[in-house]
Amino acid sequence: MVVTIVKAGGPALPMEDLIQDTYVRLCSDQNRILREARSEHPNALFGLIQAVTYSVTIDYLRRNGRLKKGSRFHVVSLQALAAEVSQPYGDDHDWPLLLKQIDSLLEQTGASPCDRTVFWLYYRQGLTVRAISLLPGIGLKESGIESMLHRLALNVRKKIGENGNKGNV
Amino acid sequence: MHNRGERVRMHPERRSCLSETVIPQLVLGLIGEEDAMPMLSHAAQCERCGSALRAATECFSRDLNPAEAAAAEAAMTRLPVRPSRRPRRNIWPLAMAASLLLAAGLSCYFYVTRSQSAVPELLAKAYTAHRPFAWRLPDAGYASLPPGERGTALTIPTQALARAEASLASTGSPKAQVWRAWAALLKRDAAGAIRLLEGAQPASGSAGFESLEVLSVAYCLRADQTGSRADYGRGIAGFDQILAARPADPRAMYNRTLALHRSGQPAQAMESILGAPRTNTTPDWTDELRGITVIIH
């Protein structure tokens, strides 16, 4: 719990209070979180406590205004990708449209839903390759993800180039 | 480990959004692959859930820096917060000493106060032990009643007197001097009583009246013993002095009447009885009056 709290919010947080809040949340609603937990993971309980601790810490930071919306996130922008595409999509208002078109291009290249999820987790949400490799259901190591991302980006560029030559992006 | 109940707790505006508890479970691999993929797919397209997912992955994947590690270690080794127990002093010796001092003080107080008040009570009890008019020592007169005249014989319990005298010997107040003289009277030592009171400093207030009364009684008793009319005269003068200040004093009136009777002045004695103010109408006092009236007749 302490490590999770420190990782999530730094060492200056009130540890005892947050640990207490974590226990309260675990036991609230007649131990609903513990009762509804379903997992065969050997460290399931430890992980659940970590998860609840993290959630409690984030809530605390949010309540105390230390966590302003977006303040702890750094945006991995697709500007570079957009620049590579060299399309007139620099305007922020066109950004959702660009993302939708890129996703459509990904689908056209034959990328599976899992591949597209990995692609967007990396390029849009800013997760690292290592973090993605640790997520359940991905089933790839870091090297596999890197090669997949490289392949997907290449395919998208190729597709954009093809569409550009055709004049209908 | 996955809380299925958490999945239904969606964002009110975006019902498919992940809750804050599910996201860390997702990052920690506690959610099964089948359930995880739709969540990840949503998080990849949702700014809110994606940001939360990234923050969670950053949180759980990073290592603590030295400062954070030190803080975490200190927090883990810190004792749980609980009310501090101040070291208790052993207060029993102090409590025992205080109790002893209090007991000693109370004993002294009660010895001084109760012993002083107990002396005349003890003397009265000793003198009137066999008299029907209990606790009315002064009113019983300065002389012993003739055996059989009131149906009882006067005897003085010497043990009670000894205790009373022992108490009197320990005090030096003017009142104690009066008590000593009274004790001497109880032993028919009229001369001793007179000696004690004549040599003492005249007291003021109630102590002064008591002293004068005892001295008058002592004169009368010595007159009974010696037949001295001068002593009767001194005694009667003393009672007159008391009655001048306290006209309703029953003891002075009783003893003055008795002294007049003993000194051979029955008419004055009767006049004293008849002229006495009827302030005390208790049955016992009325009986005493009747008794002395019988004696005078």
Image: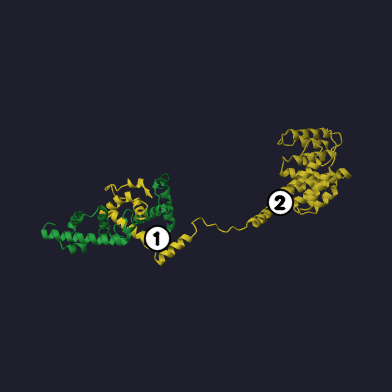
Chain colours: A green, B yellow
The reply to whether dot 2 and dot 1 touch (C-beta < 8 Å) is no
Above or below B130: residue B205 = below
Which residue is pictured at 59% across the width and 57% down the height?
B88
* Frontmost residue, B13 versus A114: A114
Position in image of residue B225 (x %, y %): 88, 44
Position in image of residue A48 (x %, y %): 40, 52
Label 1 resides on the chain identified as A
Which residue is pictured at 36% across the width and 62% down the height?
B62
Quarter-of-image position of residue B85 = bottom right
CA neighbours of label 1 inside 10 A, class few (<14), some (14 to 19), many (20+): many
* Mark 2 lies on residue: B107
* Frontmost residue, B279 versus B106: B106
Secondary structure of the residue carrying numbered label 2: helix
Q: Is residue B211 visible?
A: yes
Spot the residue most to the left. A167
Is disc 1 on the same chain as disc 2? no
Mark 2 vs mark 1: in front: 1
Q: Is B194 placed left or right of B83 in the picture?
A: right
Spot the residue most to the right. B226
Q: What residue type is labelled 2?
A: Ser
Label 2 resides on the chain identified as B
Pick the quarter of the image with the N terminus of chain A: bottom left
* Mark 1 lies on residue: A6
* Frontmost residue, B237 versus A117: A117
CA neighbours of label 2 inside 10 A, class few (<14), some (14 to 19), many (20+): few
Q: Is B109 placed left or right of B123 in the picture?
A: left
Quarter-of-image position of residue A29 = top left
Position in image of residue B119 (x %, y %): 76, 47
* Frontmost residue, B37 versus B24: B37
Position in image of residue B218 (x %, y %): 82, 46
